Image (cartoon, rainbow, N blue to C red):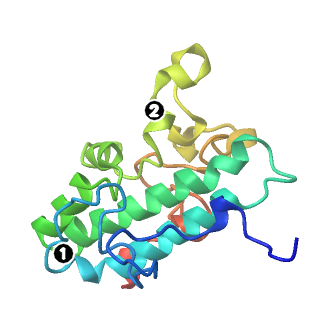
Amino acid sequence: HGLHHPPISSRPPIDQHNAAGLRKTNNMSSNRWDPKAKKPPKGFSYLAPVLSALENELRDKVRESNAGKRNTESMWPVHQINWQRSRYVYDMYYTHSKISKKVYDYCIKNKLVDAALIAKWKKPGYEKLCSTYVINTNNYKFGSTSICRVPLKDRSPEQLTAQDPTTGCRGCASGDGQPRNIFGNKYGQNLAAVQ
């Protein structure tokens, strides 16, 4: 009766490489899915603090209470943090040239970013796409796509403030007049531009 143990799910995982069970300060330095994965290439440490912070934020959001939220709204942070993490690495490589091809490929290969989403960003009309979910016609009635894919200039007055129910995106269509921050919150910020 006297001892209280936290539930198993809230205990930090034991690091197989550290017998004492102490956590590494930089948990992004080793691949979180494959303990046999290659060591990250030189230059990965430049991305690691931001990727680690986003990973921790995602973990916290998943554990957070969903009281007062619609069911789909509880998934918004998952889509939004996935977008921000992928956008960060994409921009660090393609826009700002601050990481090497080896580091970029390491992030793709080890699933630290969403490779399918990044592949879409390279295609005209999809440069700001929030999630591959919103362009899958099986996910929407009448074989269409999400409202967030409709340019603001083509929306009716009632649709101007509409958000995708699954991702929370306000508008990820290409072109002028679209929101700079597609989610209207901190997850829509361009992290690579400020680093």
In the image, farthest residue toward the top: 142
Read off the residue under disc 2: 135
Pick whichever, 69 or 152, lies toward us.
Answer: 69
Local packing at callout 1 (Cα closer than 10 Å; few below 14, some 14-19, many 20+) is: some
Read off the residue under disc 1: 99
Which labelled disc corresponds to residue 90? none
Q: Residue at x 74, y 70 (%)?
A: 5
Residue 60 vertical position relative to residue 77 in the rendered view, above or below = below
Q: Quadrant of residue 126?
A: top left
Q: Residue at x 39, y 75 (%)?
A: 27
Q: Residue 48 placed where, x, y %?
A: 34, 77
Q: Residue at x 38, y 77 (%)?
A: 19
Q: Residue flagged by tag 2: what amino acid is it?
A: Ile
Q: Residue 140 placed where, x, y %?
A: 58, 23
Q: Is residue 176 left or right of residue 65?
A: left
Q: Residue 125 placed where, x, y %?
A: 34, 42
Pick whichever, 109 or 5, lies toward us.
Answer: 5
Residue 124 vertical position relative to residue 6 in the rendered view, above or below = above
Q: Are marks 2 and 1 in contact (CB under 8 Å)?
A: no
The C terminus: image quadrant = bottom left
One can see residue 94 in this view: yes
Q: Quadrant of residue 116?
A: top left
From the viewer's perspective, is the residue at label 2 or at label 1 nearer?
1
Q: Is residue 52 left or right of residue 47?
A: right
